Image (cartoon, rainbow, N blue to C red):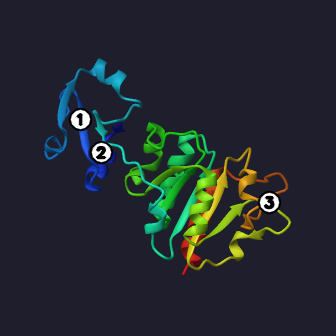
Amino acid sequence: MVEGAREIERALQLGWLGVDLWVQGEVNPHPAWESKFNRVFLAAPAVFEKLAYRPGTMGVVAVFQAKHWPLSTLRELPSNAGVLVLEGIEKPGNLGAIVRSAAAAGISAVVLADAPIDPYNPNVIRNATGAIFELPVIETSSEILIHTLTEEHYRVHATHLHSTSKELFSLQFAGRNAFVLGEEARGISDVWLDRGFENVLIPMHSQVVDSLNVSVAAALISFHWKQHSR
């Protein structure tokens, strides 16, 4: 389900397949849209109010065929690709914000590892502002992902406080790189911590702040990688 004219237009521009288009009352959708959907429905305002997940949809809601990206996508990425791995992430708003920042920074893919979240939740789509249609979002388990990343020669960075951790801003990145982040409260699981991966951290200069929201951390990592990758 995609709500709002801007998001629908971006999905169509990026080649997503439209299924149904719902239009409220006398709203006139983009004239080229009708040919892009199998069916077009006109809904009374009371019906549309129950159909739409949020206000401000400009009177249009569309159903698109979902894309499910295979794990083999990681094999096909460029030799200098950057990938964000989100383990156990649960909040749709965070995922949407991460996808938006990742796409802006040129990250090649986002991977959900053991994450109980629907990547096409309406709040993900809203917070991603259309980036969800541009960036591959892969779903898998941490164990399987570790095997794939190792096999495909990704340099893995675990965001984990450890005695051997290196500060993010001191690093430069060659080849393929994957950055593993977890929920703020729990961090990443032990399965990532005994594989010899590099531990990285974002330095904190506050006496009371010891962590960042995962979407903020992901944005900092993504843009630092963009500036210092080769």
Classed neighbour count for the residue bearing mark 1: other residues with Cα under 10 Å, few (<14), some (14–19), many (≥20): many
How far is mark 2 from mark 3, CA to CA?
A: 41 Å
Which residue, given by chain and number where applicable, does mark 2 sit on?
A: 8
Classed neighbour count for the residue bearing mark 2: other residues with Cα under 10 Å, few (<14), some (14–19), many (≥20): many
- First along the sequence among labels 2 and 3: 2
How far is mark 1 from mark 3, CA to CA?
A: 48 Å
- The numbered mark at residue 157 is none
| Front disc: 2 or 3 | 3
Residue 141, position as x, y percentages in the image = 59, 49
Total count of labels: 3
Residue 193, position as x, y percentages in the image = 76, 59
Q: Which of the 4 image quadrants contains residue 162?
A: bottom right
Residue 151 seen in the current view: yes
Q: Residue at x 67, y 47 (%)?
A: 183
Q: Is residue 139 left or right of residue 201?
A: left
Q: Is residue 220 left or right of residue 34?
A: right
Q: Residue at x 53, y 68 (%)?
A: 82
Q: Amino acid at mark 2?
A: Ile
Which residue, given by chain and number where applicable, does mark 1 sit on?
A: 21
Classed neighbour count for the residue bearing mark 3: other residues with Cα under 10 Å, few (<14), some (14–19), many (≥20): few
In the image, residue 129 above or below residue 164: above
Q: Are marks 2 and 3 in contact (CB under 8 Å)?
A: no
Q: Are marks 2 and 1 in contact (CB under 8 Å)?
A: yes
Which residue, given by chain and number where applicable, does mark 3 sit on?
A: 161
Which element carries disc 1, helix, strand or loop?
strand
In the image, residue 163 above or below residue 211: below
Q: Amino acid at mark 3?
A: Leu
84 and 59: which one is in front? Answer: 84
